[in-house]
Image: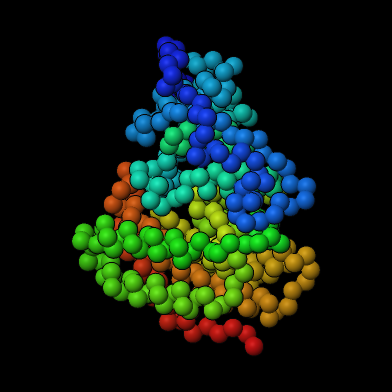
Amino acid sequence: MAVPPSAPVPRSPFYLRRQARCPQCSWGMEEKAAAGAGCREPPGAARAAAVPCFGLSVDQDDILPGALRLIRELRPHWKPEQVRTKRFTDGITNKLVACYVEEDMQDCVLVRVYGERTELLVDRENEVRNFQLLRAHGCAPKLYCTFQNGLCYEYMRGMALGPEHIREPRLFRLIALEMAKIHTIHANGSLPKPTLWHKMHNYFTLVKNEINPSLSADVPKVEVLEQELAWLKEHLSQLDSPVVFCHNDLLCKNIIYDSTKGHVRFIDYEYAGYNYQAFDIGNHFNEFAGVNEVDYCWYPGRETQLQWLRYYLQAQKGMAVTPREVERLYVQVNKFALASHFFWALWALIQNQFSTIEFDFLRYAVIRFHQYFKVKPQVSALEMPK
């Protein structure tokens, strides 16, 4: 809808003040991001310009006024009365609005406002570094600015996929190729430890200390969760899954398909970071079941997985792969899919306590825990090929 014109806001010292050192923007160059990850800069990587940081907080319950103030800075040539906005309601971590003037949204700025208390779940400085890193490798849109409780970035043209799309072989091939590309970023550098265990421990500690007394009877006891977390770490750490740069949250709506260019791109990098290769893939396979209406009947079968994994490995290695290599990754992926269930179940319990987004987080946590315990016996029985 069109936004009515409003009176100019006085340029006080507090209005869109550019901060000398913003914690989210202090890493302006891509090679610094690489250094922070303990990796060397790949030859020929494009360098990202420093990102402006504005001292403005946007009210997450009334986004438009703050979003329009940001637009005046980012697009000063746009007439306020011509700015149109569109709310996106698919996200369950943050709130998102698009601002544009042309009907075709050729130039469109997305304003993302962080959800309530999501700093408990997401390292926002790391998110900006990841954004810059992926942009430098042609895998992300432009990041225009950050502000106190969010960021603005380029709208990526295309269609956000649904569960029915990622099951199509022609599309899941593109997804496998894009994931393989991202997984090779800084693959030859000195990689840090995977983020999985550190994050899961932090999430579990929050659940144990801040949420435990109010846990639903449908949620396993904290003592059970602690035992399972220890089992996961012991069992999965022995699988020798490579540590690579991962998206870590590849649900359907985070995949944009551009039919004109014939490729997919991934969006939303707040959970991105170095992690186990098999976790990123297993987590994506879990998302075949959907988010709003979860149905694990759609979890990909063995033959679909083997085809997906073959596309992935061939893209990663640049050559034909053996059945044994594909089978080995298949076992690793399905075992790490267990960790994905556990991770997002803990996440949902925390969101249920603090988030203002309209979503039944508690129900989602119960579903993920239920699926974890349901598939654990058969997945545990999988053996690596000889």
Toward the viewer: 146 or 75?
Answer: 146
Please name the residue shown 73% across and 42% down the image: 46
Most extreme residue toward the front, as rendered?
A: 20
Give the residue furthest to the left: 213
Residue sitting at x 57%, y 22%:
75
For residue 176, above or below residue 264: below
**What colouring method underlies this structural image?**
rainbow
Q: Residue furthest bottom?
A: 386
**Which residue is depicted at the point 38% across and 51% down?**
120
Locate the C terminus by quadrant. bottom right
Q: Residue 20, position in %: x, y?
A: 52, 29
Give residue 362's position: percent from left, percent from top: 30, 57
Regarding residue 372, the answer to whether it shows in the image is yes
The answer to whether residue 324 is above or below residue 343 is below
At 62% from the left and 74% from the top, the residue drawn is 329
On screen, residue 184 versus residue 223, left or right, reads right
Instruction: Say left or right for 373 vs 74.
Output: left
Instruction: Give the number of callouts.
Output: 0
Residue 166 appears in view: no
Is residue 209 or residue 175 the one in the foreground?
209
Which is more toward the observer, 207 or 162? Answer: 207
Q: Quadrant of residue 62?
A: top left
Q: Tell me where residue 67 appears, x and y as whole percent.
A: 46, 27
Rendering coords of residue 112 (x, y %): 47, 37
